[in-house]
Image: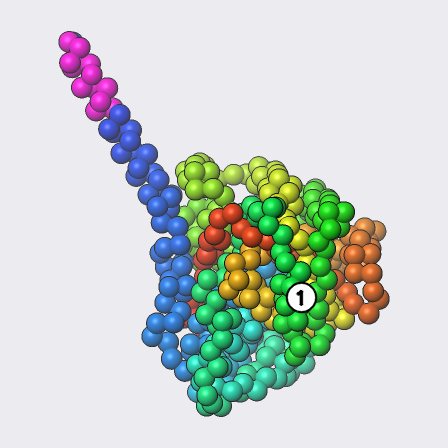
Amino acid sequence: MDRRSVLAGIGGAVVVAAGGIGWHAKRSGVFSAGRGAAYEAWHAWNAGATGPMHAVHAAILAASPHNTQPWRFRVTDTQIDVLADLERNIGSIDPLRRELYIGLGCALENLLIAARATGYSTGLALLPDGVQAARVASVQLTPAERQRTPLYDAIPNRHTNRGPYDRDRPIPEEQLKTLKALGPDLPDASVLWFTSEADRQKVGSLVVDATQAIIADSEQSADSAKWFRMSWDAVQQHRDGVTLDAAGLSPAVLAIAKMLPPMSVEDGDAAWLETTRETHVATATAYGLLMVRDAHDNGQRMQGGRMWQRMHLWGTANGIGMQPLNQMPERADREASRGIEPKFGNALKELVGDPAWQALMPFRLGHPQRPGRPSPRRGADEVVLKA
């Protein structure tokens, strides 16, 4: 075999290998972030749907714990009912359903904002059938003048940003005041800020400790892992859950992660802990603590969800990234449900420092170094109950 034949053979092998890598990259969704049926709700939310259904299309783009989307809707020409889908609870991660009702409040807020922007006045009945009923809200719709706001325009751009934030750009105090003042119609919801270096270190340390406690609890670890969609096929099939695309990774690391075999639960937990410590905590410029007067009251939990959605939309419109850090309440609820020492329950009480308020959801905020990516969404055809 002569030199030319050898080089030709090597070149052919390289082409074949490159083609195989390219095929695998395509199949793994490396070049398809934010595309496919799982993301259609983001692209088509304001195209085609009219009347009450437009409000539903906005509602399904709301935030929810672990992107579980625990909602269903019943729609007529004059009314939209919001119903809890209890089968989408996170098990031991959310044993008291605190996060589930926060997510329902987020969906309700998007729905109300979009209904008013579409040309309806809204009459809201919260928990109209009682605190344990499936129907958690009923919205009466009456034709009215359109009320389009910057929060409405931010709906398709709001994404949880899990990437690094710019530590050299603190959030101005005036913006924190504005965020806190967004809920004058939500009397049972408020927010507490932690901005000093000492306070950030204290909150960050507790977040890391709570993450370690969840990982050490095999049931919580397994229940959390059930909602992580590692493969592109799983993303498109389930259209929910936490994904690599929305993990805040750099483009290069994201491409590699997508092409690797799915991680074990143990490896996933280790990566989560490292990211929590080295990115989420290390780059937070401020922490917030969403509070309500009674964290066990489902109506107040939904008020808190509405407040969170409102703040997140405002932050989106003003270039601020936000991310819930629910590890402490998840451990506190686990402690309460199992009757064990309330380590994180007591830590949250200490952070609040006021017996009139109770912790609902900690979060971080800052100026993101890269944009947040959308999470998959189930379409309206999957969440609207048939008449």
Residue 315 position in % (x across, y down): 56, 62
Quadrant of res 362: bottom right
Q: Is residue 303 above or below residue 280?
A: below
Q: Nearer the viewer, residue 374 or 180?
A: 180
Q: Residues within 10 Å of mark 1 (few under 14, many from 20)?
A: few
Residue shown at 51%/47% (left/top)? 369
The magenta-colored residue range is 2-13
Q: Nearer the viewer, residue 307 or 59?
A: 307
Residue 59 position in % (x across, y down): 50, 71
Disc 1 is placed on an element classified as: helix
Residue 3 among magenta residues:
yes
* Quadrant of the snapshot with the N terminus: top left
Q: Is residue 44 above or below residue 169?
A: below
Q: Nearer the viewer, residue 162 or 181?
A: 181
Q: Is residue 310 visible?
A: yes
Residue shown at 44%/65% (left/top)? 156
Residue 339 among magenta residues:
no
Residue shown at 63%/49% (left/top)? 284
Tell which residue pokes out farthest to the top in this image.
2
Quadrant of res 134: bottom right
* Quadrant of the snapshot with the C terminus: bottom left
Question: Please, what is the dominant secondary structure of the magenta stretch?
Answer: helix
- Amino acid on which the number 1 mark rests in the picture: Lys
